[in-house]
Amino acid sequence: MHDKRGEITIRKLHLLSNAHLDPVWQWEWEEGAAAAVSTFRAAAAFCEEFEGYIFNHNEALLYKWIEEYEPSLFLKIQGLVQAGKWHIMGGWYLQPDCNMPSGESIVRQILLGRTYFKDKFGVSPTTAINFDSFGHSRGLVQLMRKAGFDSYLFMRPDDRVAGPAQDFVWVGFDGSEVLAHQIQDGHNTLLGQAHIKIEERINKQTPQDLELVLWGVGNHGGGPSRLDLNHIGALIESTKGKVEVVHSTPEAYFVDLARKADALPRHERDLNRRFVGCYTSMIRIKQKHRQLENELYQTEKMLSSAAMQGYLRYPQEELKDAFHDLMVAEFHDILPGTSIQPAEEASLRLMDHGLEIASRLKARAFFALSSGQREAAEGEYPILIYNPHPYPVRGVFECEFMLADQNWQNQFSMPVVYQDSIRILSQAEKEHSNLNLDWRKRVVFEAQLSPSAMNRFDCRIELLSSKPQPQVELQDGNILFRSTSLHVVINTKTGLMDQYVVEGIPYLKENAFQALVVTDNGDPWRMDTDGFEPVKGTFRLMSPEEGTKLSGISEGILPSVRVIEDGEVRTVIESLFEYGHSAVVLTYKLPKTGTEVEVHVRVLWQEKDTMLKLAIPTILHEGRYVGQTIYGVQSLETDGTEVVAQKWTALVSDSGNGAVTLINDGIYGSDCSNGVIRPSLLRGAAYTAHPILDRPLMPDDRFSPRIDQGERMFRFWLNAGTKSNRLALIDREALQWNEKPYALSFFPHGGGQIPDSAIQLTDDVIQMTAFKRAEHSEDTYILRFSEPTGIPRSTVVRIPSMNLEIPLDFNGFEVKTCKLDLQKSTLIECELLG
């Protein structure tokens, strides 16, 4: 109740009836769909039967199932929504994990959900709902606010108050604000006991005059029951005049809360941590999710570049199918790795479906964008590389191709690369194929790519008497690598990196990239801890005999630390390790130019109740640890707490003005203490082993399969330098390695016209995170840009094909969305969802 000024005069409880429905978890998606149909059917009947009752539900995926599998029920729900008896809450595609998806993926969760609910129900919720997600990145705030949300309802971390109070103002990286409420006492109730939960809240001694109570049967559907509704109806009658108890919606609660928003405390951090094992469990899911993200956003950029210039028709519906696969894969019991094994396999299959779509569309874009390339001259093998980024990209690129004919002579065909008729640094490395014949070639070369354009290289063959042998400098048995800016020492007795020196400054201590075996248990959530300790062992270098056997070599004995490639571009060193029933192959790729070292980790993993980490000890003992999060950079703990980040982390010394950065291709968990960065690679946890009271965690009468047993592969890119330089460049470097320019050996026909560079940015930092066609217009494209460092800056967006140059000014961490109108030849800022 409110007085004439709108102030609350008596205590008010908003009742939020809902049904928690995980599409998959301890069940497969078909059972999740069946539960959704039966739950929605029952809820619709109660909405019609009970006066004043409102049922609330979010997640477009579930409504899509109803629309497909029981269309008559869907029509009924549409009518109930219009009558105000059924409330569409949240409005996202589903409740995703809210730490690991990229910022652009969160935009698509909102966009696809918003579009669906607007088209089907004519509604646009203003309160976002993620009450079951395992923590929440601060980067959500800006995106929610720019998408039309003014409030956020969440529950986890449910072991404590995550912010300064249960109700607070959540502040984003860019200063955006939403009202936030953390659910207490859970989101559900047991059958027939909802009124007990409500009574307990009424009788609780509290200074709060406004409260929100969630109720609904079950954790796998169920929702409202007649028994509960009768009890609640009687309770509402019995408390009239004392407490105002109403069936309600999230928006109604936040309308009341907004009246006292000025008195609420502010929170300027994330809402973490909860269930730290979820940053690593089911690494196959996490890596494939990252791969699908990368492929879809890169493919969109390529398709948009081609379509806006008339080289192909934009495949909107095909892309949308793949994005639906990505959205489902981000569900908070899929991406965190807490579902059963059949659900894991189904999720991998789902993402493979999306990847197959992306692969076909990327090829379509590539061949369209190769228009106008000249025919190859005699003896040339053309290599085309499309750079999807709106700025020049310098790096090491790889491509394989077939020789015109098999070479059966006792000679070696050395590929040499030219750009604009000028020879550039290149070398031959072993191809993927194992045919012992000089026929298939793999060439590696260093080059700079023009922005948002196709880049042409031509390879010619020089015949040598044999493949050049590695030229290695040894000192006291160690492998010494030196270039003008980089000095690296690989210890042949340990197989580890003992020195990493950039521009004369050392950044790492001895034994870098050591594989650590850490005590763990079978719980995939790891509900009982916020960190992983103690270390119970380390992988040791294999003996030459053991390493030779692991390598599959039948004749001779090889050392377990060896140089396997060497040339003008880089030196590649391989080390072999073992622990228990597991093995690790570390491959160091040391560049002849620059300071970025690639480290490839191949793991043959057979350990249970055990975590695998890498240890990278730095000299930055007092450094602060930071990592990429959703459209921002999050400060991370340096006390050994397990933390979550996305494509990169960094240890930064403010006093020493130095930084060590580490890019990854698909991991999310790590910890840091005493200057040691420890990325988390694998766990030997069980499927959905959930601690319950003092009962045993696992069945003890049979074999229980474990997550992530077998062969897994990881890639890291290590770099170091001054703090300002590293933090300015790391975001683009991480995107370059994740959305890697696409290389293919292709002989063009010589016809057509070369497309213009599609998009160009004039500064060195601003990112273009999305370039796509608008949802409902063939002549409009959406471009999204972000400032990734927290420092205000400006750029100019150039569209050469339209002769457009548009300046954009960014606040720190600001996300801007622009609309490119082909008919009007204009680029203007617009709302986040276009």
Image (spheres, helix red, strand yellow):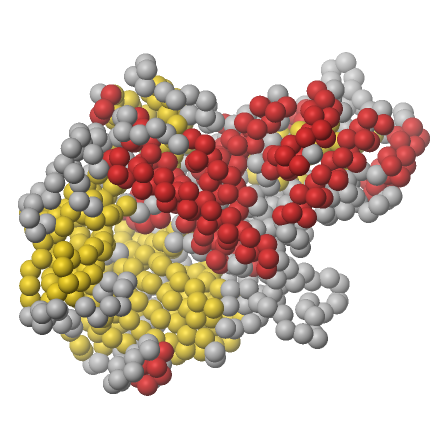
Q: Observer-nearest residue: 756 or 733?
A: 756
Q: Observer-nearest residue: 381 or 742?
A: 381
What residue is shown at x 75% (from left), y 63% (from top)?
693
Q: Is residue 560 left or right of residue 92?
A: left
Picture coordinates of residue 520, whole percent (x, y):
57, 68
What residue is shown at x 15% (from left), y 73% (from top)?
473
Q: Is residue 718 left or right of residue 43?
A: left
The quarter holding residue 43 reads: top right
The quarter holding residue 584 reads: bottom left
What residue is shown at x 17% (from left), y 29% (from top)?
753
Q: Is residue 13 left or right of residue 449?
A: right
Classify the position of the N terminus by image quarter.
top right
Classify the position of the C terminus by image quarter.
top left
The quarter holding residue 271 reads: top right
- 388 vs 338: above or below: above
Q: Is residue 167 visible?
A: no
Picture coordinates of residue 596, whole percent (x, y):
26, 56
Picture coordinates of residue 367, whole percent (x, y):
26, 39
What residue is shown at x 39% (from left), y 60% (from top)?
714
Q: Is residue 281 left or right of residue 676?
A: right
Q: Observer-nearest residue: 664 or 652?
A: 664
Give the total number of marks visible in the rendering.
Answer: 0
Picture coordinates of residue 305, whole percent (x, y):
29, 31
Q: Is residue 28 visible?
A: yes
